[in-house]
Image (cartoon, rainbow, N blue to C red):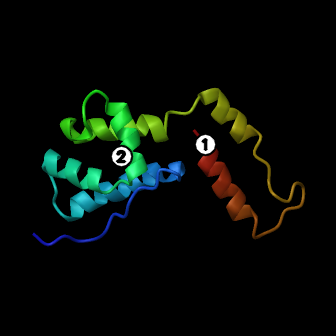
Amino acid sequence: MPLFGHIGEFDEFDKSAWEEWCDRLEQYFLTNKVEDDAVKRAVFLSSVRAATYSTLSSLCSPKKPKELPFAELLKLLQGHYAPKPSTVVARFRFNSCKKAGNRRLKLNSMPSYLAQLCALRI
């Protein structure tokens, strides 16, 4: 079976990219028609770096990552890299977001300011 695309390894030190990487992994599985849970788990485990695998092993303990279903592995790392944010903290960050130019509105800064607000919304 020919494989299409390349996922790339997940970098544990860029935790903000976790959800994007999971989206790419899901698209990889769709493109290559991967439906078997064991194959998904194998591709997933071979696509994370050593530090991420070590973290996953710690989260799975006493079991090994290869013994858990693919969905459970994703759930464990989701809780570690992208836990659900506190509503109070998220609201504070959104309300305290300021435009870079303070009171001066620059035409080229408005799209980036709006993008920043969108990223902070709950």
Residue positioned 49% across, 40% down in the render: 82
Disc 1 + disc 2, Cβ < 8 Å: no
Residue positioned 69% across, 62% down in the render: 112
Quarter holding residue 26: bottom left
Q: Nearer the viewer, residue 29 or 55?
A: 55
Residue positioned 30% across, 39% down in the render: 73
Q: Nearer the viewer, residue 4 or 66?
A: 66
Given the image, on which type of amino acid does mark 2 rest?
A: Tyr
**Left or right, residue 28 beside residue 81:** left
Quarter holding residue 23: bottom left
Q: Quadrant of the N terminus?
A: bottom left
Residue 76 image position (x, y, % from top left): 36, 35
The 10 Å Cα crowd at callout 1, few under 14, some 14 to 19, many 20 or more, is few
Residue 17 image position (x, y, % from top left): 49, 53
Q: Is residue 18 above or below residue 27?
A: above
For label 1, the residue is: 121
Quarter holding residue 27: bottom left
Q: Is residue 76 above or below residue 115?
A: above
Total numbered labels: 2
Residue positioned 23% across, 58% down in the render: 29
The 10 Å Cα crowd at callout 2, few under 14, some 14 to 19, many 20 or more, is some
Q: Nearer the viewer, residue 70 or 115?
A: 70
For label 2, the residue is: 53
**Left or right, residue 96 beside residue 59:** right
Q: Which is more N-terminal, label 2 or label 1?
A: 2
Identify the secondary structure beneath mark 1.
loop
Residue 102 image position (x, y, % from top left): 87, 54
**Left or right, residue 118 beside residue 25:** right
Q: Residue furthest left?
A: 1
Identify the secondary structure beneath mark 2.
helix
Q: Quadrant of the C terminus?
A: top right
Given the image, on which type of amino acid does mark 1 rest?
A: Arg
